[in-house]
Amino acid sequence: MTQQIEDSVLVSNYISGDEKALEVLIKRHNQRISSFIYSKVLDRDVTEDIFQDTFIKVIKTLKKGSYSEEGKFLPWVMRIAHNLIIDYFRKNKRMPMFEGSDDFNIFSVIGDDKLNAEKQLIQDQITADLQHLIEELPDDQKEVLIMRIYKDMSFKEISENTGVSINTALGRMRYALINLRKIIDKNNIVLTN
């Protein structure tokens, strides 16, 4: 049954004093968050520490009442974990620029946009170009694409919000991607950096 309760409901239950709600959230996202942290630090103990620190920060933010329900819970927690990973590398002077040893994969951190301003600028430009292209799509396709990609909604949520079946939502997404490809090809746009 708990699997069916939305993250946002659990968050507000926790804020209202239901300690169990946080347990459910941690259990639900434990695997994704731990794997993400481990993929960056490649150390079980450090992963455990950062995981703990992430949820200490989550608890503090929720208790203070400064959590805004704009984003989804998981991406928000991932951002906190991401920032703590960067802090960890800074503190341990293990930023990839200074680290040349073989046991550390430089590219696992260098890919993080926080550490690479130029890449971020290119990414922002691509995002801006893409938004212009999305504007050219038919409204029904554009709506599904925006809900799926920018609002991180599931097809079930999209179906409930638009009043169409899940299959129709999936179909619109498929056509939106096909049409985007056509627009990209037609305009000879290169969307890679």
Image: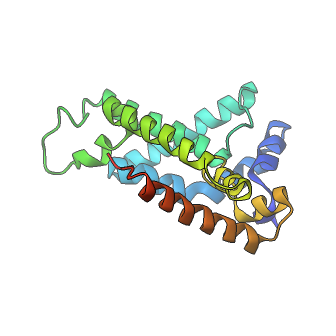
Residue 26 in the image: state x and y as whole percent.
Answer: 64, 52
- As drawn, is 41 to the left or to the right of 73? left
Q: Nearer the viewer, residue 147 or 96?
A: 147
| Above or below, 27 relative to 58 | below
| Above or below, 65 relative to 5 | above
Residue 146 in the image: state x and y as whole percent.
Answer: 65, 50
Residue 192 in the image: state x and y as whole percent.
Answer: 35, 49
Residue at the image point whose x is 63% and y is 54% from the top: 137
Question: In which quarter of the view is residue 88 placed?
Answer: top left
Q: Can residue 44 be seen in this snapshot?
A: no
- As drawn, is 129 to the left or to the right of 151? left
Split into 4 quadrants, where in the image is the C terminus? top left
Q: Can residue 126 be seen in this snapshot?
A: yes
| Above or below, 115 relative to 160 | above
Residue at the image point whose x is 78% and y is 55% from the top: 6
Question: In which quarter of the view is residue 162 placed?
Answer: bottom right
Q: Furthest-bottom residue in view?
A: 167
Q: Nearer the viewer, residue 71 or 143?
A: 143
| Above or below, 24 relative to 126 | below
Question: In which quarter of the view is residue 179 placed?
Answer: bottom right
Residue at the image point whose x is 23% and y is 49% from the top: 105
Split into 4 quadrants, where in the image is the N terminus? bottom right
Q: Nearer the viewer, residue 158 or 85?
A: 158
Residue at the image point whose x is 61% and y is 56% from the top: 29
- As drawn, is 20 to the left or to the right of 42? right
Residue 149 in the image: state x and y as whole percent.
Answer: 60, 52
